[in-house]
Amino acid sequence: MLAEGFQKPGAAGLARVRRLLVGVGAAALAAATLVLSACRPGTPASFRGAPVVLISVDTLRADHLPAYGYKAVDTPNIDALRHDGVLFENAYSHVPLTLPSHTTIFTGLLPPQSGVRDNLGYALSATPPTLAGTLKAAGYATGGAVSSIVLSHATGVSRGFDFWEDSVEPTKASQTISRVQRSGAETEQLLASWVSEHEGAPFFAFLHLFEPHSPYEPPEPFASRYKLKYDGEIARADEIVGSFVNFLKDQGLYDRSIVIFLSDHGEGLDEHGEDEHGVLLYREAIHVPLIVKLPKQARGGGSVASPVALTDVFPTVVALAGLPPVAGLAGRSLGSDLRGEPAAPAEAARRIYGETLYPRLHLGWSDLSSLIDSRNQYIESPRPELYDIVADPGEKNDLAAGLPPAFRSMRAELSRMGHPYQAPGASDAEQVKKLASLGYISASPADADAKDLPAPRDRIGNVASLKRGFGALQAGRYAEAREVLGDLLKHEPRMLDVWQMYADACMALGREDEALTALQTAARLSPGNPQILMALADYYVAVGRFDEARKHAEAVGDAGTASPHELLASIALAKGDLAEAEREARAALERYPQKRVPRIILARVLHDRRDCAGALAQLDAVARSRASEASPFQNTSFLRGDCLARMGRTAEAEAAFRAEIHAFPTNTRARAGLAMLYASEGREADARGALGSLVADVATPEAYFAAIRTYEILGDPGTANELKRDLQRKFPGAKERKG
């Protein structure tokens, strides 16, 4: 049961919910509805049948756009959209995280109402109406294409869409979920293709771009043009937006469309010690751009100063489409603002709710909540804060110590709202049962009543150590990563993400018992977290405990970054059950034909059956995908090289092995395969050089075992035994893993 003030839609107390969350009572809502039918001539209240286009540029701070006064980046396409539309100067996200923020956009509900509080471990239920579902019921075709795995259909965020293109995959097992993305240009092309098939009827199209989300890696010419790479990514996103807008114009759709441009949240850029987002709630993290272009560019160039929220998008689109208002939404229609009518007193005095559970769920710190209005922002934490955002827009001067009236008023209002903690994975009874059977939770999450957690702003400096350890891990400096992350965990034992990184470093160093302890600690800190469950499944595969791996994969279900069939296919392949691996891979392909991993598994099955021609055909299909051009997949080129070597096509095999090593320098299979290829050609010096580089460059137990095995195959037991002694000295107790 949600606390008072956050009832589910349709429950008693709906008027109180609206009054507390948006300051609009029943009378004001009725007045707004009347205004829709009595607006000024020349600015219609609704545009029945008009195409609706929603463009979300992830992680885009409003104050880094020229439309909001920023001078250090050029965004001609967004500027043109601003010229044609109405700009909302003070639009706010309710949560600085991709999945829960987009959920607020699509449901018109705040995170405590929708139940989606973080990027991991939460999913939208089938109960709340969605924007796509509402438009679909009114006869609209609904299609979306997204650039991040965070917005996978498995989260429920796609409910109501006829078409949802989310075939975004990790390129290697250790890739963190926030890094699993694809080029916005590819996403734009996929959505444009869908729009081309539906432009003759009303449609709702959603385009999601992950530029400028970290890592900031803008292509040329933007990389050279901008010193701040974040701005370079913004310029690249602007280029993609322009491409899509030009497509709409070429199709004759732009003039008659409702186009909404926004972002889900901002970015810290170290202004309060946070370089990215999710941990803190300062204005740079929640102040987002919002531009609404009406058909025929009505009121183009207009501006609205009153505070508005992302929950307003749903009721606004519904009103503009001429559909009946949807009951129970936290937001309000912005129709009167779009017509240029003066803000009602309740709207001008509106306070907008924000929250982040990320510091509690991932770092073991206190969660945060806030209220922001036209003058002040109040942040609730173990050390509450208040800022005058007019006099102090950078929020450098905390006024809380003086207990001004705004502090007392906003604190009391936030307290009345209630925003209960909800553990990830704890809302589904069947999921709780599965997790309990694995030993990670009992009747209820132990963390639900955590007290005395530190204020994130007091600990934000420790994120630098986390990033240093993560950087060492990604660079293959596993001993350094283990040392840095282990030391951090002594001071921050509740840091969920660090436990998983620490486990990865331990596994690479052959410290399997330490890795398992770390992952099990993480699983207990965050019961139901799909990424941790998948990491545990991978661990059990690596150590040959396939039944345990299967249990964890089944517990993940549809909530992971891969389909259950794909996970089960990988486990069967590691176990050597080629028939089951093929069945599960084909089942995954039947459900998601654009996915690369099931085809790679099929290629491995055919390779292991000595059908190298069939394996190459599957790999060719993978290579033809646009995703392969932007993000090569680990082991794909290795597998190609091994097939080509077996077929006697040695020059092509060498090129494939080298391509794998270039893309994934720590891939021991590719390096050992290259050495074997050299040996088969009589190039003994080259073979020894490749094996020497394998041990020197990768320097893990896995690298030693690969080199030892290869030397034994090549008939050099002396060098193999020398490496075994070196292995035992550097990594005592390390065991060779299969698969």
Image (spheres, rainbow, N blue to C red):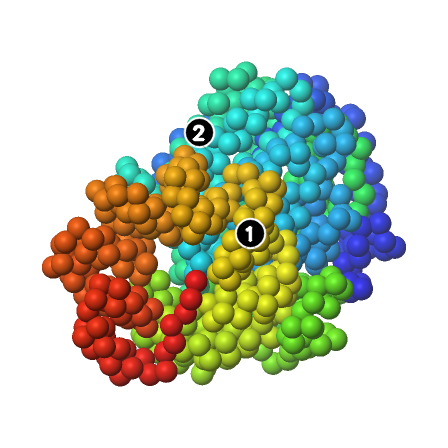
Q: Is residue 616 above or below residue 427?
A: above
Q: Looking at the picture, how far across and down is residue 146, in whole percent?
A: 53, 41
> Is 427 positioned to the left or the right of 552 in the image?
right
The amino acid type of the residue labelled 2 equals Gly
The answer to whether residue 442 is visible is yes
Q: Looking at the picture, how far across and down is residue 498, in whole percent?
A: 46, 71
Q: Quadrant of the C terminus?
A: bottom left
> Is 319 positioned to the left or the right of 703 in the image?
right
Q: Is residue 585 above or below residue 522?
A: above
The amino acid type of the residue labelled 1 equals Ala
Task: Measure how far apart labels 1 and 2 are at the Cα level.
Answer: 48 Å
Q: Looking at the picture, how far across and down is residue 626, in whole percent?
A: 42, 36
Q: Looking at the picture, how far across and down is residue 301, in whole percent?
A: 52, 28
Residue 242 numbered tag: 2
User: Residue tagged by mark 1?
Assistant: 579
212 or 189, which lies in front?
A: 189
